[in-house]
Amino acid sequence: MLLERLCNATGPSGFEGDVREIIKEIVKPYVDELKVDNMGNIIVHKKGSGKRVVVDAHMDEVGFIITGYNEDGTLKFYSLGGISANILPAKVVLIGDNKIPGVIGFKAIHLQSSEERKRSVSYNDCCIDIGASSKEEVKKLVSIGEYAVFDTEFSEFGEWLYKGKAFDDRMGCAVLIEALKENYDCDFYGTFNVQEEVGERGAFVSAFNVKADIGIVLEGTICADMPSVPKHLRATEVGKGPAISIMDRTSIFNHDIAGEIMKLGDEKGIPYQRRRAIAGGNDAFAIHASGEGAKVATISVPCRYIHSSVSVASKSDFENTVKLLVEYLKTIK
């Protein structure tokens, strides 16, 4: 299964090689040109005579980087991308290409003072335990600068959901791959970018090279449909269709393009929702701010518990995101 293969692959920011090789293998039969730039972005091209359109997804996931050693044989580490320290304790991770298993250690609640129980967790409070008993032993197994990711296997969840890691943005990568299987009149570029989670770095390079007229960014986005969150404060809801963004921290999305996408959803009977939040940012910032600029929009798959060890998303939301994107691309001449 495409999503399973992508989500189980390892690819934190700066270390996207495994994901890149999978995508190159899958998309090659469907494109006229494929190249990998110096940053590591994949840029594919389906030639057309219409407007130049880029559809963007990022390959990297949030993860960690090893920054040092403790005397007891545990590891110091920090985040690659936005991971709240509050979700770290007792999570299982895999370190580096050798996939060395580790557990994120944190002081047991029984040993915490009343003040410690009240304050938030910090990265300095945690370590990664790989079973080594000394600094000398752990140095032989793990090098400073190696990466780590959550050890989470993709699976179906109930009858209508998926759960796994890296839904941001392997969901977008999978949607883009499915869209590349169709034919269009527009001059269609697909970019699978690196290092989005640390500041859209890859997208600045690919956007500069493509110089699109229109950019569509595909994301796995925040979802807050939980019992503790009132309905009017829910950014998106799982099962309600792909989310069309209004704006976020770095971009105001083109009102006309968003309207065209929603109109198509109404005409074709494809459910969608507005993303009722402006938090976060994505590669759209790089696309609309590069060269002479481009009109941009974002279509997202709502994902619960994003930027954590496991996310949850709807099968139908993924399928309807593919349908809505394909229908929109077919209207561009």
Image (cartoon, helix red, strand yellow):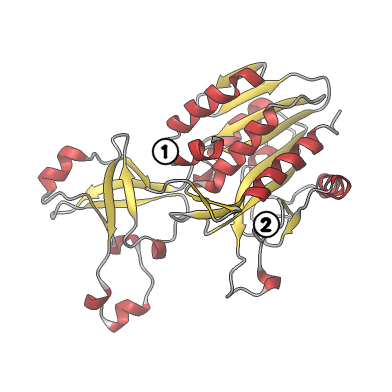
Q: Quadrant of residue 330?
A: top right
**Which disc, if any, is residue 179?**
none
The answer to which image quadrant residue 230 occupies is: bottom right
| Residue 239: image tag | 2
Q: Please tell me which residue lies in front, 252 or 130.
A: 130
- Few, some or many residues within 10 Å of mark 1 (<14, 14–19, 20+): many
The quarter in which the N terminus is drawn is: top right
Quadrant of the snapshot with the C terminus: top right
Q: Amino acid at mark 1?
A: Thr
Which amino acid lies under the numbered mark 2 shown in the image of this protein? Gly
Query: Circle 1 is placed at which residue position?
Result: 10
Q: Answer with left or right where residue 266 lies relative to residue 210.
A: right
Which SS class for mark 2?
loop
**Residue at the (75%, 40%) spot, across then down:** 323
Which of discs 1 and 2 lies nearer the camera? The answer is 2
Q: Is residue 104 visible?
A: yes
Left or right for 264, reference 33: right
| Residue at left offset 54%, top offset 47% | 167
Which residue lies at the image location 49% right of the left edge and 36% below the top edge?
Answer: 5
x then y, percent, for residue 185: 82, 24
Q: CA distance from mark 1 to mark 2?
A: 27 Å
Pointer 2: residues within 10 angstroms few (<14), some, or many (20+)?
Answer: many
Instruction: State the residue lying farthest toward the front.
Output: 159
Closest to the observer, 87 or 51: 87
- Say which residue appears at 59% left-offset and 74% top-offset: 227
The residue most toward the bottom is 114
